[in-house]
Image (cartoon, helix red, strand yellow):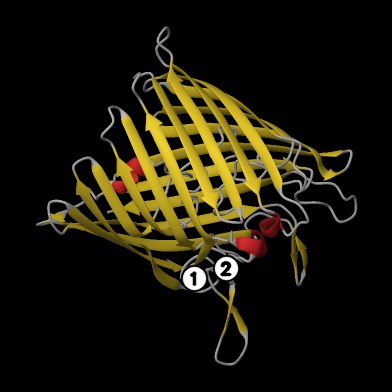
Amino acid sequence: MKLIKMSLAAALLAGSSAFAIENTKVSGDAKLFYSTDDAQHVTASGIKDSMFDQDTSMGEASLNLTLSTDLTDKIKASATFNAISTLGLYNNLVAATWTGGIQDNYFFSEAWLAATEGKTTFKAGRMLLDTPLVFSETWSVVPNSFEAAVVMNQDLPDTTLVGAYVGQHNSAATVAGVGNKTMDIDVDGDTVGDDARSNIFESFYNGAYAFGVVNNSWKPLTAQAWYYSAHDAVTAYWLQADLECQLVEGISYGLQFTETDYDKVLLGSAQDSSNDAFAVKVAYEMKDTFAVSVAYSQTGKDSKNGAGAGANLATGAQSKLYTEAWWYYGKITQNDTTAYNLTVTAPVGGFDLGVYATSATAKNGIAVGKDDDFLEVTLEVAKSFGDLDAGVYYIYTDSDSDNVDAITGKGKDYGTAQVYLTYNF
């Protein structure tokens, strides 16, 4: 429920499966997310650290409608309309929202055309992307999206070739760290909050290119390689191999390696910086019974400016490394960080249960000679009631650099409770 995975190839050919009127399909969902924690929140009336207090809670709702149509037998079009709202919760039951703003808003996250000739598909417009280092994050009530042109070819047996140009996006990463405006000026000259990612598209590193190849010639193995280039900003590559064990059914292995070279202009530094990361995973699944995986990752330590590796180049936050935390993104990709992940899921009595644990240590992460230790454990109880998906989560977080006590200067552990409701239609 936190992260809906969609391959780029699937995204290129995506359509809806709801009701159809001739060659037009309509689908969508309505979401209501709520979160509260007992971490310390500095407010005008003092420090608040109690769950379910307005100042320690956030909530938001969204309505997302997708209209897709076959203009011809070779040309498709699709548009997704999004409306976000606090439903009057702000300054009443919550003090923050998932998208960062405090006002109701509406926008189009997708509006694209796709043409297919033979085994080649070309897609252009505003869209969601899902590649290892440039992707739409779906943890919020609405995803971030891109204005791009993508071409995919499958003429080679069991091979998908991908090329993409990304011109703009509505996330925070731009050259020299200049992100989206999060405040607007109203007619009276006052600043008012606005959703930072809803209706403001900015240049994506002044234009960036991505090239990828995914091969499945040997059926147990899926291998992929990606290269990214943004002029005078960043270059990166990602290698990944996922293998299904042939000796024992249900066992699988994964290997990832990535390297990112950042330009000094982007970092606001006197020198360029590069870093790398690798991750391994072993998983076992007994169908309809349970699934378990353990993963390990390590980032490089030779970065001249402390830059990490493996994070989404669009946001600098979430990562597709196997060890990524369930909720607190950005920890495992820090410079010189060792991370571990244990994930266990099982359907029990009609409910989907899950335990997601991530532990990480960033060497010299707080200061020279002082490590930044991090632990997150998430408990999940989820169930679908027809078209309604419901999930309840409890997240335990213990981080040296988060929720720092003003007196002791040390991070204090805290808990977070979240409720996700999604109605699909």
Residue drawn 59% across the image and 45% down it: 311
Q: Which residue is mark 1?
A: 200
Position of the C terminus by quadrant? bottom left
Q: Quadrant of residue 5?
A: top left
- For residue 74, say whether it is visible: yes
Q: Residues within 10 Å of mark 2 (few under 14, many from 20)?
A: many
The residue at 42%/44% (across/down) is 4
Q: Where does the image place residue 241, in percent across and percent down from the top left?
A: 48, 25
Task: Give the left or right position of residue 371, taking residue 32 as reference.
Answer: right
Horizontal and vertical percent position of residue 387: 30, 48
Q: Is residue 46 left or right of residue 30?
A: right
Q: How many marks?
A: 2
Amino acid type assigned to the residue bearing label 2 in the image: Asn
Q: Quadrant of residue 264?
A: bottom right
Q: Position of residue 126 (x, y in %)?
A: 37, 61
Q: Where is 422 relative to 336, above or below?
A: below
Which structural element holds mark 1?
loop
Toward the left, the furthest residue is: 22
- Element type at mark 2: loop
Determine if residue 142 is in view: no
Question: Of the residues shown, which amino acid type is indicated by label 1?
Answer: Ile
Residue at left offset 76%, top offset 46%: 306
Q: Nearer the viewer, residue 326 or 160?
A: 160
Q: Of 75 and 50, which appears nearest the observer?
A: 75
**What whole-number distance in Å separates the C-alpha atoms at marks 2 and 1?**
7 Å
- Position of residue 206 relative to residue 295, above or below, is below
Dots 2 and 1: beta carbons under 8 Å?
yes
User: 130 or 342: nearer the eye?
Assistant: 130
Q: Nearer the viewer, residue 214 or 235?
A: 235
| Residue corresponding to mark 2 | 180
Furthest residue in direction front, as rendered = 231
Considering only order in the chain, which callout, 1 or 2, is on the residue closer to the N terminus? 2
